[in-house]
């Protein structure tokens, strides 16, 4: 998430920024008081604004109210050293979702930011139907298919209806990552019968991998790839978004007319890369291209796959090279990931506790937040009253 920090305390700013950046957020710090809220919102358009140093004076909340009414898209968290019940009540009235202690314990902060991210993801910016997620590899072999396939599995496990579309028309192999089934029909067959396209034809053309998880496979024969046209992709993705909660699209390397049609419809675009310069160069070009295509930065994120501790390139450097994009990290597992792919069983099903599975589960949770019991403001108010 893109986070703006405001605090009169330089040490707090420094500690908060370091902690949040380590979790992959893009953070900007602003030294000062609450009067900075409006200009910071204007300048940086953050997803989340964390304002430290609010005291117990309910009058200060007038500024917060101005912000929450002018920028309802920004989640505001306050950090307050002394919290009275009146202050908490007023804060809730003006649209503040949580008030944390100041300085906030790392765990409480992390949990509050995760809840804010989940709330933001739940507010789907494009109305009508399910979410379309596009996975754009920066280079061949960066792990795009592995990530899309495992994420699809996790989303389906949350009782969502999920369709994974394999747009690697020539060499698509997504089905083999999750199943040993053969696809009786593929994208090429659906394109050939596009005049008859409806929800039941779409469902019948996809392979049912698991409860709630279907996969529309790439053509078996690579010569049939040319039969699929941009307008077919557009029609299929549009229809799929009306009938599935999540439509994940595994894109080929490089942009073409077909992938752009899919990207145009995606609420979340993930550029997939590994922490190495050749990947970074390409990922940076992709980011530029997304900008030129007019996709707002809030729709574009990067997934850094195979990230190891002590990697030559730091996270801060990766973020900088990618224009301050939000990053999501997936761990390196050189033994277990190939094992899962070779067995055709998603790693998230083989081993839920694996670091790679946990990283992907976090992303699934952000995309499809489960209701969780949180220490709500209201609960704390009642306890205090
Ligand atoms: N997190 C990971 N840890 C270790 N190895 C990984 C990881 N992710 C992917 N790999 C390895 O990278 C290989 C390529 O992954 P994948 O096929 O998903 O990439 P891709 O970007 O879809 O490639 P392609 O260009 O073939 O479509 C896999 O066979 C796997 O061995
Ligand atoms: Mg692939």
Image (tube, rainbow, N blue to C red):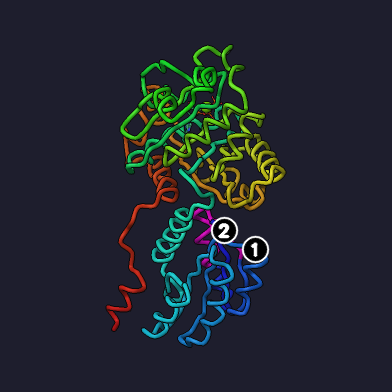
Query: CB under 8 Å between callouts 2 and 1?
Result: yes
The residue depicted at 39 percent of the width and 52 percent of the height is: 369
**Percent position (x, y) of residue 153?**
38, 36
- In the image, 28 versus 312, the foreground residue is 28
The answer to whether 182 is drawn above or below residue 382 in the figure is above
**Percent position (x, y) of residue 224?**
56, 13
**Percent position (x, y) of residue 51?**
53, 73
- The secondary element bearing badge 1 is classed as helix
The answer to whether 119 is drawn above or below residue 293 in the figure is below
The residue depicted at 32 percent of the width and 75 percent of the height is: 380
Report the magenta residues as a range.
15-28
Q: Is residue 19 magenta?
A: yes
- In the picture, the disc for residue 125 is none
In the image: residue 50, left or right of residue 154? right
In the image: residue 178, left or right of residue 13? left
In the rendered image, the residue lying farthest to the right is: 292
Q: Quadrant of residue 102?
A: bottom left
- In the image, 296 versus 343, the foreground residue is 296
Instruction: Name the residue carrying label 2.
Output: 2
In the image: residue 231, left or right of residue 173? right
- The secondary element bearing badge 2 is classed as strand
For mark 2, does the 10 Å Cα neighbourhood hold few (<14), some (14 to 19), or many (20 or more) residues? many
**Percent position (x, y) of residue 200?**
40, 27
For mark 1, does the 10 Å Cα neighbourhood hold few (<14), some (14 to 19), or many (20 or more) residues? few
Instruction: Name the residue carrying label 1.
Output: 44
Quarter of the picture holding the C terminus: bottom left
């Amino acid at each position: 998430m893109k986070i703006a920090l405001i605090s009169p305390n330089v040490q707090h700013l420094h500690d908060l920024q370091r902690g949040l950046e380590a979790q992959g957020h893009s953070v900007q710090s602003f030294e000062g008081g609450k009067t900075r809220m409006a200009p910071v919102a204007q300048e940086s358009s953050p997803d989340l604004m964390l304002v430290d140093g609010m005291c117990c004076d309910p009058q200060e909340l007038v500024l917060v109210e101005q912000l929450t009414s002018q920028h309802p898209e920004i989640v505001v968290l306050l950090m307050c050293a002394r919290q009275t019940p009146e202050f908490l009540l007023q804060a809730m009235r003006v649209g503040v979702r949580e008030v944390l202690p100041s300085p906030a314990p790392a765990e409480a902060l992390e949990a509050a930011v995760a809840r804010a991210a989940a709330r933001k993801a739940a507010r789907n910016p494009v109305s009508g139907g399910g979410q379309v997620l596009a996975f754009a590899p920066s280079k061949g072999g960066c792990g795009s298919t592995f990530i899309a396939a495992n994420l699809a599995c996790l989303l389906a496990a949350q009782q969502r209806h999920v369709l994974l579309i394999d747009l690697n028309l020539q060499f698509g192999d997504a089905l083999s990552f999750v199943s040993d089934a053969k696809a009786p029909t593929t994208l090429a067959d659906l394109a050939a019968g596009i005049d008859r396209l409806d929800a039941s034809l779409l469902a019948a053309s996809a392979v049912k991998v698991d409860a709630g998880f279907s996969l529309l496979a790439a053509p078996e024969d690579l010569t049939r790839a040319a039969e699929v046209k941009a307008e077919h992709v557009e029609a299929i993705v549009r229809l799929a978004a009306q009938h599935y909660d999540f439509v994940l699209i595994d894109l080929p390397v490089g942009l073409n007319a077909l992938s752009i049609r899919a990207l145009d419809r995606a609420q979340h675009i993930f550029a997939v890369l590994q922490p190495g310069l050749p990947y970074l160069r390409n990922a940076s070009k992709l980011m530029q291209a997304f900008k030129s295509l007019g996709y707002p930065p809030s729709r574009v994120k990067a997934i850094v796959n195979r990230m190891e501790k002590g990697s030559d390139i730091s996270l801060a450097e990766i973020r900088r090279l990618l224009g301050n994009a939000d990053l999501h990290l997936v761990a390196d597992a050189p033994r277990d990931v190939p094992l899962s792919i070779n067995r055709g069983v998603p790693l998230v099903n083989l081993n839920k506790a694996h670091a790679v599975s946990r990283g992907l589960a976090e992303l699934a949770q952000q995309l499809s937040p489960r209701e969780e019991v949180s220490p709500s403001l209201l609960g704390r108010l009642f306890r205090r009253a």
